[in-house]
Amino acid sequence: MLTSEEKVYFGILVILTLSWAAIDFARIAAVIVSRPGFSVRVVLSRAVRRLPSMLTQVGATLPVFRLRPREGVFHYLIFAAFSFYALVNVLDTFSAFTGFSTIGQNVLLDAYNLIADVLSVLGLIGMAYFLVRRFVQKPPVLNFNPGVVLYPKVSAGGIRRDSLIVGAFILTHVGSRWLGTAFHLAQAQETSLYLPTASVVSLALAGLPAAALAFGVHATFWLAVGLILLFFPYFVRSKHIHIFFAPLNWLLRPDRPLGEIQPLKTDGRPLALQDLRWHQLLDTYACIMCNRCQQVCPAHNAGQPLSPAALEINKRYYLTDHLHEFADGSAPRVPLLDYAISREAVWACTTCGACVDICPVGNAPMLDIIDIRRSLIEQGDTLDAGVQKSLENLGKQGNSFGASGRARAKWTQGLPFKVKDARKEPVDYLWFVGDYASFDARSQQLTRLVAKVLNDAGVSFGILYEAEWNSGNDARRVGEEGLFEMLAEHNVAALDSAQFKEIITTDPHTMNALRFEYAKMGKRYKVSHYSQVLARLVDEGKIVLRPQNGVNGATRRRVTYHDPCYLGRYNRVFDAPRALIERSGLQLVEMPRNHNGSFCCGAGGGQIWSANSKQAERPSEQRIREALALGDVQTFIVSCPKDMAMYSDAVKTSGNEGKVVVKDIIEVVVEAMAESAHEPKR
C-alpha cells in the first residue's frame, strides 16, 4: 500500500501527465474533424453498425497475420497482454491506494491472476522478439528503396529510436508489474497456483530482508504504473498511438468500394495536408509503420522510389512537428511533394490496390497518390510522353490507341455471323468490349473467340460499335478528372440508347468503372466479366467442356492462373475463372500470391501507356518467374487483355520463351470444347 506522500505524488503525476497528453490528443482530434467530409452523425452510424462484428472478429482474425504469420503471432502476444493490462493497471492502482489484495479472494480474481501472469510472460517474449528482429536481424522489409522520400526525422532514424523507446517501455512496464507480483508473494511468504511464473520468481526472492521486499513492492509499482503515466505524453506523439487510432480507423472507414474514387477540388494549387479528407489523416495516425504495403507494392518491388508506407509515415512526422499550427489553423500550405513523396513515386503507382488490401489497420495510401496526380494534372504537370499521348488519343478519338472510332468493331470482320448493334435492336447482353480487346492485335483474335462461343451458346448479345468509348477508368486514376467525365458522359448516353439486361466486359478496368464510377453518376448497371458469363453458360449446359478428370482418364495438365487486380481485388471475382479451368480438365496450381493477394502485372493506373524504364525488373517479369518456380507448369492463364499484352511481352523480355505460354481463359474454354466434341458417346 502506498504511503500518504506517495499518494499525493501519484495524484500530481496523474494530473500533469494526463493533461499534457489530453492537450495533444485534442489537437489531433481537432485536425481530423476539421477536414472535409467529416460528419459526427455519419461516423457514429458507422461505429454502431460495425462495432459488434469488430469485437467478435478481432481476437481470431487480426490482419497482422497476413504475409508475416510468425510476426503476427508475436504481435498478438503483445496485443493481448497490453489490452489486458488496461484492467491490470486499474486494479493495481486500486490495490496500492486501498491495500486490497487480488490474491486468493474468489474464482474471478483467480482467473484474472492466471491470465495476467501468463500474458505478462508472453508479452515480454513477444516484445523481446521484435526488438531482436529490428535491431539484430534487421529484415530488409523494414528498409526503403533508394530515392524514396523520407522526412528528415525518419531518415535520421526516428522510427528505430521510437521502436527502441516503446520496446524498452513495454519490457520495463510489463516486467516490473510481473516482478512486483513476485515481491508481493515473497513478502506474504506464499505462492499461488494462479500465479505460476511469479510464484517461481518469488521463491528466489524469499530470502531477502523484509525491508528489501517492501522496497521492491514500492519500486516495481512506480516503475509499472508510474512509468505508464510518464509515457502518456510521449505515446500521443509516438507511432504507437496506432493502438488507439487503428480500431477507430476500422470502425469509421468510409463505406466505399475500392474501385470508387471521391471527387477532389484543390483550386489548381499543389496538394497539401489541408486538402486531404478526414479519413486520410486518420489513416496517418492509424499507421503501424510495418511496411506491409510497400512489401506488396509492384512499383517498390521493381526498384522504384515509391513506398506507400513512407508516404503515411512522412505525413505523420510532419503533422506531429506542426500539430499546434494545424490544430489552430495557422499551418502554412506546404505541398505533400515537398516532404511526403516524390513526383517520380507518384507516377510509378499502378493503382493495383494491394497496399489498401494488405493494410492491417485499413489505410488507403493509394488514394493520396491519386489525389496528388489530380492536383498535378490541374497544374499542367508535364507527363510521361506515352501517357500524354494516350490521354490525347482518348480526348480526340475515345480510345487510347488513337484509332478512328469507326475501326472499333473491325475485330468482327471474318466472323461467320453479324454481331448485333445494341443501339438498334434489343439484346440480353450488351458487350462493352474495351480498348485493348478491340484494337490490340494480340487480343483481337481472343475477342473473336469470345464472340463465337457466345454465339454458339445461343446468347443474345450486341455491342455499341463506334459509340463505345474508353470507360475512363485509367484516365481517372492518372488524374485526368475532366477527361474521365467526358468519356463517362458519352458512354452513359450510348448505353441509354441501347436496350439490354446486363453488361458483359472483357477488361476488368472497364468493369470497375461501369460498376462503381458510373454508379456515382446515378447509373447502376448489372455488370459481369466474360469469365463469369462463360462459367454461367457451362453450369447451364449451354457450353459443354471436357470432364474434370481429363479425356479418357488422361493426366491433367498443370497450369497456373493470374488474378487481375481490377477483377479480383477490386471486383472480388475469383471463382469463375478457376471453375472454368477445373471444368476444362486442367489442374490448377496456385502461385504463392493469389486471389486478393495477387501481384500486379504493372499495367494499371496508366502504366501500360508509360515509357518508364527505370525498373530493376518489371512486375510482369517477376510474376513470370513466380509461375516458373512452381515447377512443371507451362501455361500461364490470364483473363484480362492488358494481362495478355503485359505477360506476352514479359515472357520474351525475361528470356523465358519456350518455357511458358500465356493463354487467355477463352482459349482454355475453346480447347476444352474441341476436346469434348471428340469424346466417345456413352
Image (tube, grey):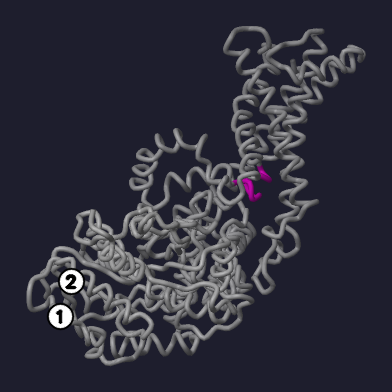
State the residue at coordinates (50%, 49%). Answer: 29
Q: Residue 278's image quarter?
A: bottom left
**Majority secondary structure of magenta residues:** helix
Compared with 307, 206 (above or below) is: above
Q: Are marks 2 and 1 in contact (CB under 8 Å)?
A: yes
> Which quarter of the figure has residue 49?
top left
Residue at 60% over, 60% down: 295
Foreground residue, 205 or 610?
A: 610
In the image, taking residue 383 as reference, residue 393 lies left or right, namely left
Q: Residue furthest left?
A: 425
Q: Classify residue 31 as left or right of residue 52.
A: right
- Residue 389 point in image, percent of width and height: 41, 90
Q: CA distance from mark 2 to mark 1?
A: 8 Å
What element does badge 1 sit on? loop
| Foreground of the two, 434 or 541 | 541
Mark 2 sits on what residue?
Answer: 455
Q: Position of residue 535 (x, y in %)?
A: 28, 58
Question: What residue would you read off at disc 1?
Answer: 417
Range shown magenta: 233-241
| Kind of residue indicated by mark 2 | Asn
